[in-house]
């Protein structure tokens, strides 16, 4: 997989659709224990209810409309992810 897109990136899952999503987090896990690459909300509505979060894999993105903000903290996070040390640094159990 390429590098993960930054938080705030606006994407589409279907080029024909008018529905857009904004990436708001990484590696969400659903009730069944399945983990995806991103958590996202519909754009431009955002998170108005706890039921509006979508779990998306990078391979399902068909178009990137806007790439979110990147700074040193983003680069550091990508380095941790690349080394497989994200969970360890966030104190997440595997």
Image (cartoon, rainbow, N blue to C red):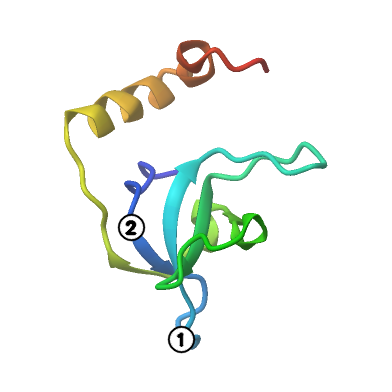
Horizontal and vertical percent for residue 16? 48, 88
Residue 26 image offset from top left, x and y in percent: 49, 40
Label 2 neighbourhood size at 10 Å, few (<14), some (14-19), many (20+)? Answer: some
| 12, above or below 89, in the image | below
Q: CA distance from mark 2 to mark 1?
A: 16 Å
Q: In the rendered image, which residue does mark 1 sit on?
A: 18
Q: Is residue 7 left or right of residue 55?
A: left
Towards the viewer: 80 or 50: 50
Residue 61 left/right relative to 53: left
Q: Does dot 2 land on a helix, a strand or a loop?
A: loop
Quadrant where the N terminus lies?
top left
Q: Identify the disc placed on residue 64.
A: none
Horizontal side, residue 10 vs residue 88: left or right: left
Q: Find disc 2 in the rendering and name its residue.
A: 9
Instruction: Please tell me which residue is depicted at 47% across the width and 64% down the height of the picture.
Output: 61
Q: Residue at x 49, y 80 (%)?
A: 19
SS at circle 1: loop
């Amino acid at each position: 997989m390429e590098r993960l897109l930054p938080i705030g990136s606006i994407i589409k899952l279907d080029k024909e659709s008018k529905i857009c999503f904004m990436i708001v987090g990484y590696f969400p896990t659903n009730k069944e224990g399945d983990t995806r690459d991103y958590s996202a909300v519909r754009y431009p509505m955002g998170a108005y209810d706890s039921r509006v979060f979508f779990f998306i894999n990078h391979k399902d993105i068909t178009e990137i409309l806007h790439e979110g903000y990147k700074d040193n903290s983003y680069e550091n996070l990508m380095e941790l992810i690349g080394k497989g040390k994200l969970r360890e640094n966030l104190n997440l159990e595997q």
